[in-house]
Amino acid sequence: QAIRLAERGVDNAWKTVEDGLKDPRAEVRKAAINGMSFIPKKLEESAFALLADSSYRVVAAATSRLCASFPDKKDKVLEAVRDLTTPEAIVEIARLEILASSGNQQAVNDLAKLSGPSREFRTRQNAMRAMRRVGVLTDEGARNLIEATVHTNGRLAAVGRETLLWFLEQLRWRELIR
């Protein structure tokens, strides 16, 4: 609610949002960073501090929001999280998604690898969803999606089917999948 008030011009509401970004509870920091579609300049420093947060979900959200809000500082943000290894590759996938969205083919290839059978199912799901958001598919990514659709893990199979169907609806990817 403080975010909506701040976006409507209630200036002291930004202080409440900033307090949320600095709260000792991860779920509050996560709600604060996820609640903003755009980070205002006055919260830039507090948001950048979240790149070193103890919650990887907060780090991933901060990475995405900071790159969208401050495109001129994208390299600095991505460098800050470059060497993080996180459960379910949450931060790695957020970083690769940003790079892939900018046309980085290596990032596209890396997302495809993360969607493969050598990864645990949540990493695979996260990578598949990122491939869909980016809207780019590789041969390896297509093979991994097809393999996931018949996986014995129903949750993985559902995401695989959903993502594969989305790509099949895109004319440019139909031939690659067939």
Image: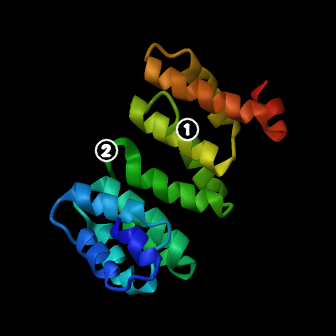
Q: Residues within 10 Å of mark 2 (few under 14, many from 20)?
A: few
Residue 151 in the figure: left or right of residue 167:
left
Q: Nearer the viewer, residue 139 or 131?
A: 131
Q: Give me the residue at 56% from left, 82% from top.
A: 72
| Residue at (49% x, 71% y) in the render | 38
Locate residue 112: give its quadrant.
Answer: top right
* Residue at left offset 48%, top offset 59%: 95
Q: Earlier in the sequence, mark 1 or mark 2?
A: 2
Q: Quadrant of residue 165?
A: top right
- Badge 1 crowding class, 10 Å Cα cut-off, few under 14, some 14 to 19, many 20 or more, is many
Which residue is identified by label 1? 128
Secondary structure of the residue carrying tag 1 is helix
Q: Amino acid at mark 1?
A: Met
Quick check: 140 left or right of 39? right
Spot occupied by residue 103 in the image (x, y as percentages of width and height) = 69, 61
Residue, disc 2: 87
- Up/down of 62 relative to 112, above or below: below
Q: Is residue 82 visible in the rendered structure shown here? A: no
What kind of residue is marked 2? Pro
Number of numbered callouts drawn? 2
* Residue closest to the eye, 39 or 126: 39
Quadrant assignment, res 51: bottom left
Q: Nearer the viewer, residue 18 or 130?
A: 18
From this viewpoint, which residue is outermost toward the left?
A: 24
Answer above or below: position of 3 versus 55.
below
| Distance between the alpha carbons at the discs numbered 1 and 2 | 16 Å
